[in-house]
Image: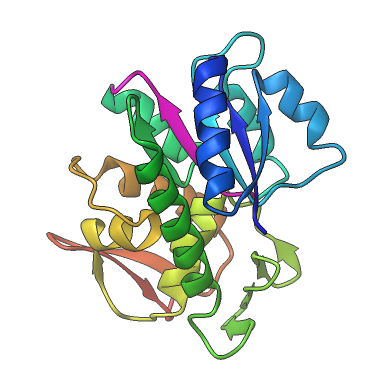
Amino acid sequence: MPHVFVIDDEQNIRDILEKYLKKEGFMVSTFQDGAEVLCALETTEPDLLVLDIMMPNVDGLELLRRLRKHSFIPVIVVSARDEELDRILGLELGADDYLTKPFSPRELVVRIKNLFKRMNRLEHGATSYEINVNNMQLNKKKRQVFIEDQELVLTPKEYDVLSFLIQNPGQPFTREKLIETIWGYHYAGDGRLIDDLVKRLRKKMTGADMKIVTVWGYGYKIDEEG
């Protein structure tokens, strides 16, 4: 039974989501701010977080920033604010999906189930947990990437994009396809989400015998020639 943390400072929202998610077969723990969650994470690791942005004490984005320093727990960010900057910031910090309030509990359940399916597909997309390309090693089970013996410190989405490209060497993908594959929905933006992520990956991949190259007017691909 998947364990979901619901973090929101509004009691009625916590109660509604807890009731609905339990009805759908999830174990649920609720919290009113990020500080409570940080304490709970010291002893319990949930399968997914539903995280509100605007909260007292430790807000959602700060909690996500701290969480991503050491954890790959899936996170769906929810917020009453629908500004593009907030959405991009949440996703760049490592959120796996973003919902704008008000939303239906049914939609949240669909997003959660799709997220688990997508993660399973990415995790088992190749026949082996260990992938070695030139001087890079990818451990899919542990979600780790190494150059020689040096582990790259990657955010969850940086790992997902790099892992996807490495498993499809030489094949170019549009920004839209990468976003749809990694985040699971069509992002109606200008591609900055992927461009910024690739820029960060390139800096971290210094010393690798491969690189992410730009396919002008199209998107990106892995070049094994480096």
Q: Residue 29 sits in which quadrant?
A: top right
26 inside magenta stretch: no
Please identify the quadrant where the C terminus is shown: bottom left
At a point 59% along the width and 33% down the height, the residue shown is: 6
One can see residue 75 in this view: no
One can see residue 74 in this view: yes
At a point 73% along the width and 19% down the height, the residue shown is: 35
75 inside magenta stretch: yes
The front one of 72 and 199 is: 72
When the figure is inspected, residue 218 is found, relative to residue 112, above or below; the finding is below
Percent position (x, y) of residue 203? 51, 50
Compared across the picture, whether 150 is left or right of 88 comes to right
Compared across the picture, whether 23 is left or right of 99 comes to right
Percent position (x, y) of residue 46? 70, 47
When the figure is inspected, residue 193 is found, relative to residue 124, above or below; the finding is above
Please identify the quadrant where the N terminus is shown: bottom right
Instruction: Return the residue found at the far top.
Output: 56
At a point 34% along the width and 57% down the height, the residue shown is: 184
When the figure is inspected, residue 209 is found, relative to residue 27, above or below; the finding is below
